[in-house]
Image (tube, helix red, strand yellow):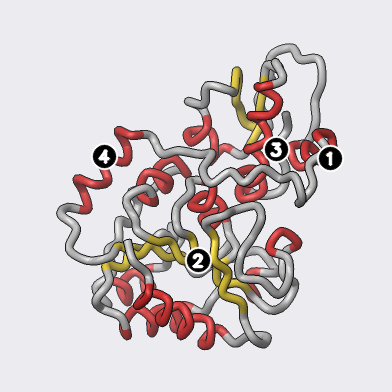
Amino acid sequence: MVGEQGHGDNIQFCRFLYNLHAAGARVLFQTTEGLIPLLNNSAIITWIGRYTDTPPEFDYWIPIMSLPGVLGVTLENLPKQVQYLNARPDAAAAWLKILGAKKRMRVGFSWSGRRDAWLNRHKSVPFETVLAMIKRNPNYEWINLQVDVTTEEDQALAAAGVTRYPGSVQSFADTAALINCLDVVISVDTAITHLAAAMGRPTWLMLQWFATDWRWMLDRDSNPWYPTVRIFRQPSMGDWTSVTKKIEQYLTWFKV
């Protein structure tokens, strides 16, 4: 099995490794380096490595995003898997200890994808818009999940009372363990959304109007791939303020 595209694509489609395992296959998986610590304890994967690693001998290979076609999966028969990835219990327990006693609803957030990707200018929420939402809602414990913050952004988040752990997250296994401790995750279309949703956590996706990715479909706030995802779509190109205002309203209704 060869991973392809980005981290999120691999997370979304690794659900189908279970199908291969159930059919009796010995699963060998080449994927992005950041996902290896998250997946290397899986009971269904015999071998996992980077794209540059040489796998053991195999009989067949396939790109991971071609699996649904080979398996005959359609939107009509797509399994409604609420959770198919887990955080390591010891890592999640360690994060709970770091976070301390819970006093408010814990809201994890991320506002940007890869900053060097051309589409990121459309799908990422301006930092100032996210910061304004946080400042308007100090009654929640906001926890930063964005790993590539600048010094200026980190200082602004600290001043707004955001919980941050710069340098503590080294892989998606670390992110998964932290997400496991949160009540809801709010993010743009990036790997964090896929990870939180694959773990079955309440996940709120802030989605751009321009060049919406195929997997999120159109004109709906739910998604067949991820039952725990709620989509907050831009009503018009560039209008993130309407998105954050709607999220603020939903936060007042959300019960944990």
Cα separation between marks 1 and 4: 39 Å
Judging from the image, what secondary structure is the residue with disc 2 in? strand
Q: Residue at x 61, y 70 (%)?
A: 221
**Callout 3–callout 2 Cβ contact below 8 Å:** no
Depicted 101 relative to depicted 58: above or below: below
Judging from the image, what secondary structure is the residue with disc 3 in? loop
Which one is closest to the eye, mark 2 or mark 4?
2
Task: State which quadrant residue 190 falls in.
Answer: bottom right
Asked whether residue 48 appears in the rendered view, the answer is: yes
Outermost residue, top direction? Answer: 57
Cα separation between marks 2 and 4: 24 Å
**Callout 3–callout 4 Cβ contact below 8 Å:** no
What residue is disc 1 on? 69
Instruction: Kindly identify the amino acid type of the residue bearing the numbered disc 4.
Output: Ala
Asked whether residue 159 appears in the rendered view, the answer is: no
Cα separation between marks 1 and 3: 15 Å
* Horizontal and vertical percent position of residue 107: 35, 65
Cα separation between marks 3 and 2: 26 Å
Q: How many residues crowd around disc 3 within 10 Å: few (fewer than 14), some, or many (20 or more)? A: many
What residue is disc 3 on? 3
Which one is closest to the eye, mark 3 or mark 2?
2
Q: Residue at x 35, y 77 (%)?
A: 252
Instruction: Kindly identify the amino acid type of the residue bearing the numbered disc 3.
Output: Gly
What residue is disc 2 on? 204
Question: Quick check: 166 left or right of 199?
Answer: left
Depicted 72 relative to depicted 256: above or below: above
* Horizontal and vertical percent position of residue 101: 15, 54
